[in-house]
Image (tube, rainbow, N blue to C red):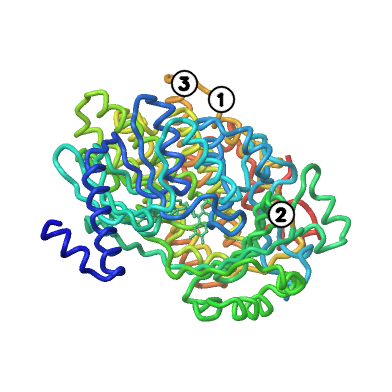
């Protein structure tokens, strides 16, 4: 026997095993070092898995690796938070990725966004101001069981020839000149791979963002706690008031993303196809300390104080509570998300704004679209240096507009008058601006279309001023409102038009004109709101604070321009003013259960 063999033979059994394992690991590393991919996606959550599928559809020759640290299949119901989708996210899954069959048969069709504002002691849902559709909007959206979706995506991408390593962790990333290299760990096997592109889809692990020091804090600060109950929570059963039930002309209210809203907080109730219901509490820490909701018993006690009707329902299902999670100060941004040095960030690894209005899947849809464009062009030999910078700016500008919708706005949640108008404004703008661009495949082109970009910048300024106006309006004294239904969809012609307009598939020249028309419409809509609120304030000449605020509004040149635009078209092209009239109607004694808006 050689000297080495003698020395190995002399080792204890344990030491010999250890040595063998180390030798094996080295062999694995060496043999896999040359495994090459075009794209390595770090993290196989919704963002990573959908990106892999989209990229493969768009450029079938691409060699893609997805590395996911969790083992598949993952559990249904409790796997992830982020179950409610809106039009862009739903459209991405259904139309871009071709998952309609899965959405129709394995997930639930959603019945729009619905909010119930606080009334008295929140014991009777029928007394609360309800903002929601009376019939399902024509364009389908879905409530997504995330475990079910990710399991399906995990097997679909493998069928498409994508390498999917589950139960495998990204340990190290080294960004290099031609091929980036990654160190991966699969149980006790450590190995390396190389890839031309690296996409960070690792969610809150934010592997690349941390490594590259791209973390950007934001002014928005809110906390969340959530849990799943292994039962269907059906808000229809919360009242036997016939008029309340009759508000819904078609559809099942329990399939909405139902929100119970109060000062500084909102609760979500989302039914899942797997039979569970997701319940979340989202709070402004300035009003509700995190410590009040950060354990299940505390969250339930908090619900008993603020949302007793909901708390009593949860009590009935206490034995069926499946999980409990919390997230403190969940919002953040990023200094850069796409680079011509062949790395990108998608999903929560880069930016997260807020769960109100459920835009999470929209960010994935838009981000992945821009990433696919960059990667495909680069792999096809195009120089993408300028394009990467432009796409980066487009995405981060889009995120900035979204942050503006939330920053300092949680104070409005206790003010139904202002918040009802804000919801209608925000949803209208989402459909008429972002929806129109997305469904006409414009995000990739945006940076190369100066006219559209100029319009979007104009809208961005408008949005900043309107959100500030909501805060200023909120600071004024408002009468309490109850027993009212605000049908923001079926009853408002402009909402139906904006909703349907998103998917009209206009030719390029017409789209440009439609986008310009929508911006003008939003300027007039804002002018109408300012005009109506000022008119309402004029009825209180003795309220000094109110009159000071009115004077400020009247001398603000930005608002003066909006007022003038509104007045110019008020007779020739009137806009239904009922969306802003909640306060006014209340003063005239709102009939119980009357509709705020009528067609
Ligand atoms: C309170 C709250 C409520 C929300 N509600 C909604 C909603 O209603 N609708 C909506 O659209 N969005 C919602 N979101 C956002 C939604 O959760 C995210 O948009 C979505 O989950 C992001 O998906 P992702 O793939 O980026 O991240 P994730 O789903 O977190 O996926 C990241 C993956 O990376 C893996 N990973 C991490 N580190 C490594 C590593 N080192 N190696 C390998 N793999 C790794 C993880 O295991 C994970 O599977 C909500 C978010 C919060 C915080």
Q: For residue 76, what is the image quadrant?
A: bottom right
SS at circle 3: helix
SS at circle 1: loop
Residue linked to disc 3: 510
Q: How crowded is the residue under tag 3: few (<14 C-alpha within 10 Å), some, or many (20+)? A: few
Question: What is the number of the mark on residue 504?
Answer: 1
Question: What is the number of the mark on residue 451?
Answer: none
Does any atom of ligand 1 lie closer than 8 Å to the CB of label 1?
no
Spatial separation of the CA atoms under disc 3 and disc 1: 11 Å
Q: Position of residue 561 (x, y in %)?
A: 42, 44
The residue lying at 29 percent from left, 28 percent from top is 448
Going by the image, does 271 lie left or right of 425?
right
Task: Mark 3 or mark 2: name the one nearer the start of the chain.
Answer: 2
Seen in the picture, residue 503 relative to 298 is either above or below; the reply is above
Q: For residue 575, what is the image quadrant?
A: top right
Q: For residue 480, what is the image quadrant?
A: bottom right
Residue linked to disc 2: 275
Spatial separation of the CA atoms under disc 3 and disc 2: 44 Å
Task: Mark 2 or mark 1: name the one nearer the start of the chain.
Answer: 2
Q: How crowded is the residue under tag 2: few (<14 C-alpha within 10 Å), some, or many (20+)? A: some
Seen in the picture, residue 324 relative to 180 is either above or below; the reply is below
Can residue 394 be seen from the camera position used here? yes
Q: If the image is split into quadrants, where does the N terminus sit?
A: bottom left
Can residue 566 be seen from the camera position used here? no
């Amino acid at each position: 026997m050689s000297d080495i063999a003698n020395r190995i033979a002399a080792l204890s059994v344990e030491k010999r095993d250890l040595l063998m394992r180390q030798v094996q690991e080295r062999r694995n590393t060496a043999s896999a070092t040359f495994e090459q991919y075009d794209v390595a996606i770090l993290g196989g959550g919704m963002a990573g898995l959908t990106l892999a599928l989209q990229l493969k559809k768009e450029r079938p020759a691409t060699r893609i690796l997805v590395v996911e640290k969790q083992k598949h299949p993952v559990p249904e119901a409790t796997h992830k938070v982020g179950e409610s989708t809106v039009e862009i996210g739903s459209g991405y899954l259904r139309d871009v990725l071709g998952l309609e069959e899965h959405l129709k048969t394995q997930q639930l069709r959603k019945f729009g966004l619905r909010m119930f504002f606080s009334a008295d002691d929140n014991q009777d849902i029928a007394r609360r101001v309800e903002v929601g559709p009376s019939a399902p909007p024509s364009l389908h959206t879905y409530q997504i069981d995330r475990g079910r979706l990710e399991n399906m995506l995990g097997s679909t991408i493998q069928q498409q020839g994508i390498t999917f390593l589950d139960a495998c962790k990204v340990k190290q990333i080294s960004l290099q000149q031609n091929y980036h290299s990654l160190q991966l760990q699969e149980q006790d096997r450590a190995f390396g791979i190389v890839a031309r592109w690296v996409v960070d889809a690792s969610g809150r692990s934010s592997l690349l963002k941390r490594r590259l020091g791209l973390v950007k804090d934001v002014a928005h600060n809110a906390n969340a706690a959530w849990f799943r109950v292994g039962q269907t929570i059906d808000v229809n059963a919360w009242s036997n008031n016939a008029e309340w039930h009759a508000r819904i002309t078609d559809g099942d209210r329990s399939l909405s993303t139902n929100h119970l809203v109060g000062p500084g907080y909102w609760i979500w109730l989302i039914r899942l196809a797997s039979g569970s219901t997701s319940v979340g509490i989202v709070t402004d820490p300035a009003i509700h300390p995190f410590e009040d909701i950060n354990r299940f018993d505390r969250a339930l006690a908090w619900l008993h104080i603020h949302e007793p009707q909901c708390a009593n329902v949860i009590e009935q299902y206490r034995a069926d509570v499946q999980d409990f999670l919390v997230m403190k100060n969940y919002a953040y941004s990023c200094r850069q998300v796409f680079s011509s040095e062949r790395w990108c960030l998608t999903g929560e690894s880069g930016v997260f704004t807020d769960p109100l209005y459920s835009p999470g899947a929209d960010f994935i849809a838009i981000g992945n679209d821009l990433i696919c464009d960059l990667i495909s062009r680069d792999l096809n030999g195009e120089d993408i240096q300028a394009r990467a910078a432009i796409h980066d700016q487009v995405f981060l500008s889009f995120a900035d507009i979204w942050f503006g919708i939330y920053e300092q706005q949680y104070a409005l949640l206790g003010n139904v008058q202002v918040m009802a108008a804000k919801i209608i404004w925000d949803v209208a703008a989402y459909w008429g601006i972002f929806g129109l661009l997305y469904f006409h495949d414009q995000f990739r082109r945006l940076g190369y279309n100066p006219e559209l970009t100029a319009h979007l910048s104009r809208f961005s300024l408008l949005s900043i001023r309107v959100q500030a106006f909501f805060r200023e309006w909120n600071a004024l004294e408002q009468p309490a409102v109850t027993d009212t239904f605000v049908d923001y969809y079926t009853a408002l012609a402009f909402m139906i038009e904006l909703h349907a307009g998103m998917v009209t598939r206009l030719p390029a020249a017409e789209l440009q004109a439609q986008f310009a028309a929508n911006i003008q419409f939003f300027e007039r809509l804002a002018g109408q709101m300012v005009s109506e609120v000022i008119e309402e304030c004029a009825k209180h000449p003795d309220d000094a604070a109110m009159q000071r605020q009115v004077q400020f509004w009247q001398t603000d040149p930005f608002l003066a321009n909006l007022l003038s635009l509104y007045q110019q078209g008020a007779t020739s092209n009137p806009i239904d003013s009922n969306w802003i009239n909640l306060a006014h109607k209340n003063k005239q004694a709102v009939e119980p259960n009357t509709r705020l808006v009528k067609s």
